[in-house]
Image (cartoon, helix red, strand yellow):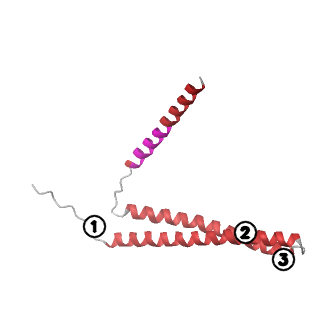
Amino acid sequence: MHIATRLASIAASGALTLGAFAATSTAYADEVPTEPCATQQAQVDKATAALERVTAVFARQQERVEAKREAVDEAAPGQEKAAAKKALAAARKAAAGTKVTKRAQQMRLAKATERLTACQAEPPATESPAPR
């Protein structure tokens, strides 16, 4: 009985997973860009939104570093100061990682903007009639 229950649950979860993939693929199939540079514009919009999110995270982490720095200044000598310095080091490390991520996202946005500009600079392609 236990094996049959397990096999039934595996089959059901597999069907749900495949159904979810089929639903997402048909949802994206309906989205055909009508404008010549719609895909590039969507990429720029997506990159801009991602950069805003990363910038917000970076700002929060910078605030944490400042708070940890103040905690080190206010800490009593000894174990308390050592723990505060350790927390400051961890906060700086996290901020450094986010700084790299922010720079990478800025580069992605620059490339997406470059592609959009290049697309908009191209003359619109005219469809020629098919030869008979």
The image quarter containing residue 96 is bottom right
Compared with 53, 81 (above or below) is below
Which element carries disc 3, helix, strand or loop? helix
Which element carries disc 1, helix, strand or loop? loop
Q: Which residue is mark 3?
A: 73
The image quarter containing residue 87 is bottom right
Q: Callout 1: 10 Å neighbours few (<14), some, many (20+)?
A: few
Residue 6: x, y in percent? 57, 30
**Magenta stretch, overall SS:** helix
Q: Nearer the viewer, mark 2 or mark 1?
A: 2
From the viewer's perspective, tell me whether residue 5 is left or right of residue 109: right
Q: What number is the disc on residue 1?
A: none
Q: What number is the disc on residue 90?
A: 2
Residue at the extreme bottom = 73
Residue at mark 3 to residue at mark 2: CA–CA distance: 16 Å
Residue 97: x, y in percent? 62, 69
Q: Amino acid at mark 3?
A: Asp
Q: Which residue is mark 1?
A: 124
Q: Residue at x 62, y 69 (%)?
A: 98
Residue 91: x, y in percent? 72, 69
Q: Where does the C terminus fall, quadrant-wise? A: bottom left
Write the start and end of the magenta stretch as one range: 16-28
Closer to the N terminus: mark 3 or mark 1?
Answer: 3
Tag 2 near tag 1, CB within 8 Å: no
Any part of residue 67 in sight:
no
Residue at mark 3 to residue at mark 1: CA–CA distance: 62 Å
* Residue 26 is covered by the magenta coloring: yes
Q: Callout 3: 10 Å neighbours few (<14), some, many (20+)?
A: few
